[in-house]
Image (tube, grey):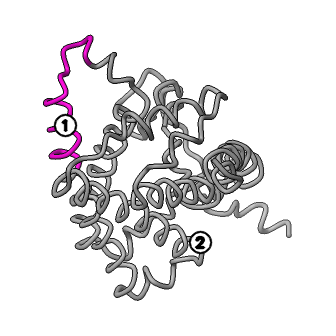
Amino acid sequence: MNTLDVILWVAIPYATIAVFIVGHIWRYRYDKFGWTTRSSQTYENRLLRWGSPMFHLGILMVLAGHVVGLLVPREWLYAIGVSEEIYHFGATGLGTAAAVLTLAGLAILIYRRRTVGPVFLATTPMDKVMYVFLGATLLFGTLATVVYQLFGGGFHYRETISPWIRSILLFQPQPELMQNVPLLFQVHVLTAFALFALWPFTRLVHVFSAPVGYLFRPYIVYRSRDAQRGARPVRRGWDPVKAPDPERLHKL
């Protein structure tokens, strides 16, 4: 293990985690009005109706697979009856399908941003940077899965990448676990860290937004203007116009 390994697999992960946490706190405190999806649905809806559900469904499946594969030890899965064959089918088969669905949805969304004039004008430079790293992360992850898991002899990332991730989160880093990891997986991990470092400064912050307050807000009371409803008579908001008093006019 050399200095580069320590930088790549210890320093960069912890720097990314720090930027991710502090960046979100800073963004929420000082840029609440910018904490938004920057929705462009009003500009175009036909492509968005296809691309957005595909991307969001696919990315949720990808995230769920990563949480299970990286954070849950395989012994725990064995304990609840998930065998190696079942896990391999889910991780490889369903994971590849989820990746293809996500990439297809992302491709439609990028095409929409590039070809629809109002949407393109509403795209910020940070949006473009975010799309580059998001696309690179998904692409390298998909390539690694296809090359090593589908058509290769298989790579046991649950014996290398998974325990390394858990060692980082437990503040007991083991960078030596990443030394013999194939290059495509390493690049996938590094681009993912770059994406997480950019996350607080992009529209991706909306992932952590949920309308929880909507469930506890007070009721909205509607009052009718119909005179036949309610126990109290409806009062006018203006006085009726009357004819002028002739006597007062005579005095003037």
Q: Amino acid at mark 2?
A: Met
Q: Residue at the location (37% across, 67% down)?
A: 41
Q: Secondary structure at mark 2?
A: helix
Q: Main secondary structure of the magenta part?
A: helix
Q: Position of residue 179 (x, y in %)?
A: 52, 49
* Residue type, mark 1 in image: His
Numbered label attached to residue 126: 2
| Residue plotted at (71% across, 51% down) | 27
Tell which circle, 2 or 1, labels the residue nearer the N-terminal end: 1
* Residue labelled with disc 1: 88
> Is 88 located above or below residue 199 in the figure?
above
Residue interval drawn in magenta: 78-95
- Relative to 60, is 199 on the left or the right? right
Residue at the front extreme of this rendering: 1
> Residue 137, percent across and down?
43, 61
Residue 56 percent across, percent down from the top left: 32, 52
